[in-house]
Image (cartoon, rainbow, N blue to C red):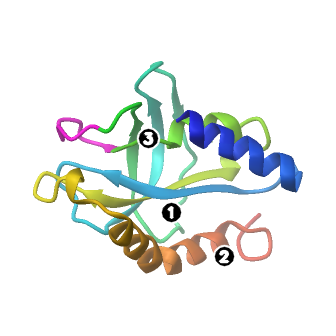
Amino acid sequence: MDAAAAATNWLHSIHQHGSRDIWINLGIAGHPDHPIGKTFLANRIKNMQTGQQWCLATRADLPCPTEPVISVAQPDSSYEINALVEMEAAGFYHSALQYTDADRIYCLKVVSDNRNNPANQINGKLVTQLIQQRLPVLGQIIAAISPNGGDR
């Protein structure tokens, strides 16, 4: 989470984003049951370390379902939490809130592991494939939420 927060702050510092800019975190997450490659937008993010939670704005016009995201400090392969579990969304979201409004921050997660395909099988090639395959979904989201392509 700290690395994601630092990366978000660094991006802001080198690009001097405006307060109306849109921020999107794209990454992978585990889930007990969802199939590998299924894509979700976060509707809630919880920092498991601090207990801090944020509810994210959701929109019916976006091309994927929503799901809660739990950010943990260390990998969790227990698959006991019925949510997307990952290590960066809370840090990203907390930092992005300094630079824009909450309704302009999105978190897109691709399922990378589950009970039947555990996290120890994840490698760089798999992550690259999963993200590349979901770039069209990211493009659709950007088109829908951007000032020139959506209602904003």
Neighbor class of circle 3 (other Cα within 10 Å; few <14, some 14-19, many 20+) is: many
Disc 3, SS: loop
Q: Residue 19 in the image: state x and y as whole percent.
A: 85, 47
Q: Quadrant of residue 81?
A: top left
Whether residue 94 sits left or right of residue 152 in the image: it is: left
Q: Nearer the viewer, mark 1 or mark 3?
A: 3
Residue at the image position 18 percent from the left and 41 percent from the top: 79
Instruction: From the viewer's side, name the closer residue of 89 and 76.
Output: 76
Q: Amino acid at mark 1?
A: Ala
Tell me where the magenta segment starts and ends, as one range: 76-84
Residue marked by disc 3:
87
86 inside magenta stretch: no
Q: Nearer the viewer, mark 2 or mark 1?
A: 2
**Residue 130: percent from the left, percent from the top?**
38, 71
Which quarter of the figure is the C terminus placed in?
A: bottom right
Residue for badge 2: 143
Q: Is residue 106 above or below residue 37?
A: above
Q: Earlier in the sequence, mark 2 or mark 1?
A: 1
Q: Residues within 10 Å of mark 1 (few under 14, many from 20)?
A: few
Q: From the viewer's perspective, is residue 40 above or below residue 48?
A: below
Residue tagged by mark 1? 60
